Image (tube, coloured by chain):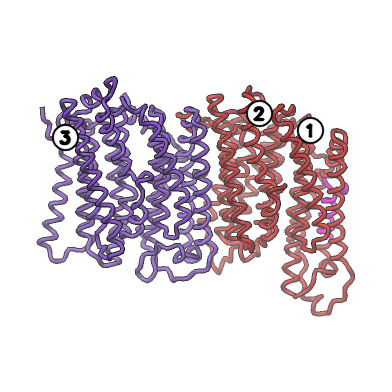
Amino acid sequence: MSDIPYLLIMTVLPLCGAVMVLLAQDDEKTNGRNVISVSMLTVWGSLVFILLALSHVDSSYGHMQLLEKYVWLENPEITLTLGVDAFSLLLILAVNMAALIGMWGGRHEKGCQKSCMVFALLFLSLITGLFVAADIMAFFIFFAALLFPLFMLIGVFGEVKRRAALFRFTFYSFCGVLLFFWVLVILYNHDGANLLISKISQLTLSSKTEFMVWLGIFAALLSRIPIWPFHGWIAAVYVGIKNPLIFILANMMPLTGIYGLMRFVPESVPVSMVFLATGLEIIAVITMLFIALIALINVDFKFKIFSFMMVYYIFYLMAAFFPTSQFMMNVGYSLFAFMIIFAALEVLVSYQEDECEAQKLLPEGILRLMPRLSVVFTFMIMAGIGMPLSAMFVNNFVLISALLTYNFWTGVCAVSSLAVVCVALLLEIRRRKHEVKFSVEQVSAVRDLSKKDVCFMATMMLVLILSLINPLWFIRG
Amino acid sequence: MKNWIALVPEFILIATVGVSVLVWMFRDKATPKTFYTIAKYGVLLVLLSSVVLYDQSFYPKIYENNPYTTLFKSFIYLGALANMSLAVRFFLSTDTASFRFYVLQEISLLFLCAAISFVDVRWLFCCLEVGFLFNYHLIMTENDEEDNMAPAKTLVRYSVLFSLATLVCAFVLSYLAGGGDFQNVAALLQKNPVPFHVYICGAFLIVSVLFKLGAAPFHFCLPTILGRTILPVSGYLALVPVLAYYAVLIILLAHVVNGIYDVLRPAMFVFAVASILVGAVGANTETNLRKMFAYVRIFAVGVVLALLIKFEQNSVFSSFIYLSVCVLTMLGVYAVFYGFKSRGEYLDSMVDVAGVSSSKPFLAAALLIFLFSLLGLPPFLGFLGLLSVVNTLVAQQNYWLIFVVLSGLVVLGAAFLRIIKIIYFDRKNLHFDRVDKGIYLTLAINLFIIAVLMINPKYLMNDIEVALWTLIQ
């Protein structure tokens, strides 16, 4: 065991980075380069600590390691506990890498100012805190605190046009936070202490309290996931975001809800929440199919990426209701690859859209003018639909098999949704590679990815391939 | 045995008023800064002497100081100092006379703080009522429009009626108890059975304090007054006297009316729920920012009363934490209001501050932090307040009250989202003036205190608790 407080460092480092960004010189001369360099350096620093932490944990799920305790309050007595297992570290790694890709892709964006980066790093710090929170109070603090930077990122820098949806989204997220708070206080008073998340399912509660607690947890966590009845405004808000970094960060929000459900929901579902779990499963399947079908007919590629994300998120969410936790690490490995793919896709699509807008071109055939981008883009799409290019391939296969074993019809619906959304992505790639006649000026005006960009993306592709060869390569033992 | 040393803070305050009057009478070129400087040093000295003489009592059966009274007095003086330093910017920029404001504020502080230390109901209520009636003169400072005078006149009419009735009750109780000190009156109210007229008198003392706190349904004039008075007066009335009234309420509940409190509890429940609902709903109906925050104050008073329904150590502690956090946050909100200025005019309408974030991003961000804090969201200080409140209510198994408080917060959240929408997303209508550096400094100090207290809540949650225990024990 190590005495270094890795988890605290991982959480605080982006916060320190945010302060450094705030102090960084940012004028016409530097043109935001300082800000982006400091931000990326911070994320690289975080990645180093995450990898170091990974070298100290075993690859089991649910066994919290590297535990750190901090006394926060004496009356009421609250000690915050941080702890991780390989699953949460994989998610932290994925989130940081996705943010890094977003920062790389968004470094030329006009909206990518100092304040935007400050909030992005603040968001990263808080989401890391959420993944390392081992007790319910720490989880709640980070769960609620995420709302502030997210609102600032989406509302102020995201250029979202449908503001009514944004306010509804914020309002319902706030209601979710209050519900969670209610549950937190009930549990705290029941046990007289801050509970570890893993202990919640072992509490002996009266049937009424148990029902209230689980209903509160479900509703609070679901308010972050775009399944019915929260699907409408979340989609409206997320799809409208122009900046790739903010799009990527905003789309991590459902991950907090899914992660929460995975951590809170026990293997053996308490009697009072069986109907909740069943109801959720039905709603999830319907939402999945619904979103996948819309992705098929929608021409907006941003919506397709959003649908791709949401269908996969809900697919992973279903794994939370497996009567065993043996597949959770598969979810972790798959999610790790998935986050990198989704972030890379978003950055590449934004790049194409910017070029189309600058040269007044339609997206049809645009990839023919960008051979480097075309290679990377195709790789990412292929990896995203589950081809043997990343950890998604093996792990999704295992998860689908488990889903079909435990609940055949749910599994069929989920697989159909995945297939539909994959078809939507393939159709889009066909559209963008479609043979179109361009003028000589247009051919010369369109800029392909720079060599630097290609090197960066190649690194990410290498990480994905490594995750296919051995998803555990960075974990001890 | 009379210990005159214990009255040094009060004498300093009287001397400060005297110096201000002399300067006003004899100095030709007295600027707003002159009166501010006198008031600042006067109140600082008072604060210092109050802390040094924290356990000195003038006459044990009439006027006592202890850590509890010193804690509240310190908070009151600090709040007043913060408001004074902001107010001077108002008087300098509007080029209006500040003498009246500073002197009246000093007199008000004198009466409010004296009321906290008195252990005799007659003296306590005399000070409290005189101090409250002085508010009328404060409200009228630089405020001579007919429209603005109407609510102040309504308030003074009701205040005089309440004051007279309260004083009658206090003197009747003292007469029947054979003396006005708390022990005698408490013994009278603990008799079994309590005579009806004694019960009414005791209950009226509490109602009188609730009236001053602005709890619903006695809130009728408060939002209008806070919305229409000049900004320094509005800031003072919104932030400072509430601490004194709260301190007096706790003293009365702990030492005077505890014998009849079981009977008063349902009434307290009604006041609490009504204040929470009126505060939350009222905030949604307002387009004037100061009026909106007056409703937020009513909401906060409602939460405090909800905690005091079951009067015990934890409820006193939680209500104090919640109130302190609210006052600190509201101080920040008022500091932001001082920054909302266009062509020399202070803005208080929501329409006027539309799009302020584009030209004053730090001001807008600070307001956003204060709003999130008032909603009790982590990682802001308000979370500690809300945590303390809900934790106590759960321990008391008051689940319905938790539901009311959380529902109120949801409704309040809708009102705050309206403000956020306007300051961040609406098109700018006006050109905003340069913000004084002092305002940024005040905001920075406020945010620093909030950050320190959030990272290490020990100072707020544990150290202050010790001072509060002296009251209960």
Q: Quadrant of the rendered structure where residue B251 is? A: top left
Q: Residues within 10 Å of mark 3 (few under 14, many from 20)?
A: many
Q: Quadrant of the rendered structure where residue A242 is? A: bottom right
Answer whether labels 2 and 1 touch (C-beta < 8 Å).
no
Dot 2: chain letter: A
Question: What percent of the width, then of the height, locates residue A186?
Answer: 56, 30
The three-letter amino acid code for the residue at tag 2 is Ser
**The residue tagged with tag 2: helix, strand or loop?**
helix
Residue at 83% in and 79% down: A440
Say the numbered circle drawn on residue B269: none
Residue at 73% in and 53% down: A343
Q: CA distance from mark 3 to mark 2?
A: 57 Å
Q: CA distance from mark 2 to mark 1?
A: 16 Å
Q: Residue furthest top?
A: B192
Which residue is disc 1 drawn over?
Answer: A322
Say the numbered circle drawn on residue B6: 3
Depicted A415 relative to depicted B318: above or below? below
**Magenta residues, as a range?**
A375-390
Task: For chain A, give the colour.
Answer: red
Which residue is disc 2 drawn over?
Answer: A198
Residue at 62% in and 66% down: A110
Q: Please name which of the two marks, 1 or 3, marks the residue nearer to the observer.
A: 1
The three-letter amino acid code for the residue at tag 3 is Ala
**The residue tagged with tag 3: helix, strand or loop?**
helix
Q: Please name which of the two marks, 2 or 1, marks the residue nearer to the observer.
A: 1
The three-letter amino acid code for the residue at tag 1 is Phe
Task: For chain B, give the colour.
Answer: purple
Whether residue B163 appears in magenta in the rendering, the answer is no
Depicted B394 relative to depicted A382: above or below? above
Residues B214 and B304: in front is: B214
Left or right: B378 in relation to A358: left
Left or right: A454 in relation to A234: right
